[in-house]
Image: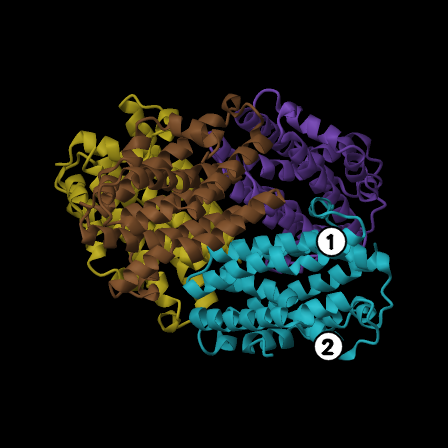
Chain colours: A yellow, B purple, C cyan, D brown
Amino acid sequence: MSYGTTFAAWRDAAGQHWPAYTEHAFVQGLGDGTLPEDCFLHYLKQDYVFLMHFARAWALLVTKAETHDEMRLAAGTVHGLMNEEVALHVETCARAGIDEDTLFATREARANLAYTRYVLDAGHSGDLLDLLAALAPCVMGYGEIGTRLAATRSSDRYIGWINTYSGTVYQQICHDVGALIDAAVARRIGDAPQTSPRWPSLCDRFTMATELEVGFWDMGLNP
Amino acid sequence: MSYGTTFAAWRDAAGQHWPAYTEHAFVQGLGDGTLPEDCFLHYLKQDYVFLMHFARAWALLVTKAETHDEMRLAAGTVHGLMNEEVALHVETCARAGIDEDTLFATREARANLAYTRYVLDAGHSGDLLDLLAALAPCVMGYGEIGTRLAATRSSDRYIGWINTYSGTVYQQICHDVGALIDAAVARRIGDAPQTSPRWPSLCDRFTMATELEVGFWDMGLNP
Amino acid sequence: MSYGTTFAAWRDAAGQHWPAYTEHAFVQGLGDGTLPEDCFLHYLKQDYVFLMHFARAWALLVTKAETHDEMRLAAGTVHGLMNEEVALHVETCARAGIDEDTLFATREARANLAYTRYVLDAGHSGDLLDLLAALAPCVMGYGEIGTRLAATRSSDRYIGWINTYSGTVYQQICHDVGALIDAAVARRIGDAPQTSPRWPSLCDRFTMATELEVGFWDMGLNP
Amino acid sequence: MSYGTTFAAWRDAAGQHWPAYTEHAFVQGLGDGTLPEDCFLHYLKQDYVFLMHFARAWALLVTKAETHDEMRLAAGTVHGLMNEEVALHVETCARAGIDEDTLFATREARANLAYTRYVLDAGHSGDLLDLLAALAPCVMGYGEIGTRLAATRSSDRYIGWINTYSGTVYQQICHDVGALIDAAVARRIGDAPQTSPRWPSLCDRFTMATELEVGFWDMGLNP
């Protein structure tokens, strides 16, 4: 499923940072089942808190929308993040004896905090495009990783995670967010966005968020 | 249905501004059917734009939440505002030949703009309580008006409006928002909030938003 | 002294709203001395509160700056607004027996509140350009009015006001803000900004703020 | 010189994190002159960018002020940070052949980014007190370190740094910010702030920012 033309261009501009994120050792461990259980649980707890702040960033996007479509998709994403995407985290952690209130109160690792606060500041300091460029690596990267692991995994140990991100619901989100980004870009910087003076700084936003994803996986490997 | 103890105290503190809002001539005209059609349509168009900015303010509240409950209710309210509460507006205006894109592009009247931007600034300049105090008059006032008109109306001309705000769905929202406010107040300024140094400024926020509601009805009478 | 090419284009796009603001009856009354004293005092008190919120908006611009020059000019403007531009207000009101704490606590008129909260929301919902387009009518309009009244006034009754805005210090601010706007536009939407898809919405921001200036003068005539 | 009672209580609540910051190996190296030159230069470049974002955070505080004194001190601090506190950085780096534009464009280290974006989000998600609690460790910690190193240093190698933070100008800032915090606390949560339900979360803000200071020194040691 296509994630849009802007995303493809931003991913190219991120160079080697993109595979450093999407083919990270943590990801390989999800696919071949070698990721230790305590790393996965540590990651899930941190990722739950990440998703709460990520939902805050999508809510910030609602406040920065100019069209009905932008508002509606952003509001729907806040809802989806808080109710659907976290289901895997809540259920897996519940089986490990961790309830949702405990999850919500998880002390953030430094790499986690750095990432979400960077995204939120992208929104506060810039406009909707600056925020979207910082949000895109997480949304689409997980979509890419899920799709690849669904096709190439050699173990079913983390099949729940793989199914979540390769599944129809999540892939549709990636598609819709990709279309939103393309429309928002056209609306604000036109049909040849790569000629806009804003293009380099949007690429920088995307690349920095991609680097922060790498830091997040690194953190996951060090519980 | 109870809207909570904080709301009751804020309403008392608003003095004569509260009945100036909830018993405004526009409201009487909804109940006895004397409100001219063009006033109602003018109001609905402005109120549609109001609700979009009001949804932005509830989205801002998501970004300022400290608990899971606060986040969840705020996110649910954004969803409800954009999908349920506007249904009346969209349908009524559609019957008058106005589609939703046209509604979304309605030029804001000054009294409309003043109100929503005041609410948004309450959130940006303060914390979640400052924002809730500015949001409460609209949410609960419409709940009170709907309940009263359902019991006392002498005309069915505006029964759609009355049913929306007196209905179970909307009354439940008022109840839930009231409980959210009580919990948010207890969490931040304690069990005797009226002794907090912040109490007067929260009352001022509520009263100013109430006065801006009066301005909104005035605007509705002058299409 | 030139206020820059972007400002000139925005002013043109505002059409008749611009002279409705800069040649308002209130302005004529400043020039020919027919403005009643109580109107002027009412205006000064409201304008003092306006300038505090306007300083908040320039402080918001500091948080949205991308270059050292943008940060420095915005920070300098916050300083100038709070310390220099208000001197006229503070001194005139002091002679009328109103101290600065009382001025700060002035209850905002609706037209005042609507204006500053609109400007602040322009900044929160958009980027630095959206905020500049909403800030420009006040900064440059007062510069134009001051210059014209200095040349054409038939009375010295309000010479203090006229000298403030026609003087070198204020005219330099208008020049510097005009240069900042031109540079910020070039940096974000390029050398042919009128071909950018963002141009119409920037013009709308400028025009709405101009209309809100008209509302402010109207308010000044009704103490 | 006293930095106020609130700061003293927050520092106590930070426990061992406070000396981990103020007596960090980097600090010892400033005092005994053993800090390698490349570490100091690396730190100065990162700290310059830090101060720009710190100035943004103080500008955000201007937008969240409720009193004239709060506005004035915050605006003055933005000015001081951008014009005075960076003088040491600009001059030292100029001697090393790095001009201010290059400094401004320094790529942020992760520990730097994490800290400033955390502070900014404290302001956006909360009120003025939340922001002050996140700003205080940097302001006052440097004041304490400067004073101690001025009295105990065994080397003059970093005397410029030590003089900046032990000097009268900077110590006065610490005193004024301490008084601002005490007044802002009294205004919002009263005369017994430690009994307020908000007290623990304000202490958490202060402690987290203190931990992020430790991370900043760690980063300084690894150029």
Apparent side of residue A92 relative to residue C16 in the rendered image (left or right): left
Residue C6 in sight? yes
Kindly identify the residue that appears in the image at 67 percent across and 66 percent down.
C210
Apparent side of residue A200 relative to residue C169 in the rendered image (left or right): left
The amino acid on which the numbered mark 1 sits, given as a three-letter code, is Gln
Residue A113 position in % (x across, y down)? 34, 41
Label 1 chain ID: C
Q: Read off the residue under disc 1.
A: C46
| Tags 2 and 1 touching, CB below 8 Å | no
The amino acid on which the numbered mark 2 sits, given as a three-letter code, is Arg
Quadrant position of residue B151: top right
Residue B11 position in % (x across, y down)? 72, 31
Kindly identify the residue that appears in the image at 44 percent across and 58 percent down.
D83
Assign a secondary structure to mark 1. helix
Instruction: State whether discs 2 and 1 lie on one chain.
Output: yes
User: Which quadrant is home to the N terminus of chain C?
Assistant: bottom right
Q: Residues within 10 Å of mark 2 (few under 14, many from 20)?
A: some
Kindly identify the residue that appears in the image at 32 percent across and 46 percent down.
D162
Apparent side of residue B38 relative to residue A11 in the rendered image (left or right): right
In the foreground, A82 or C147: C147
Name which of mark 2 and mark 1 comes first in the sequence. 1
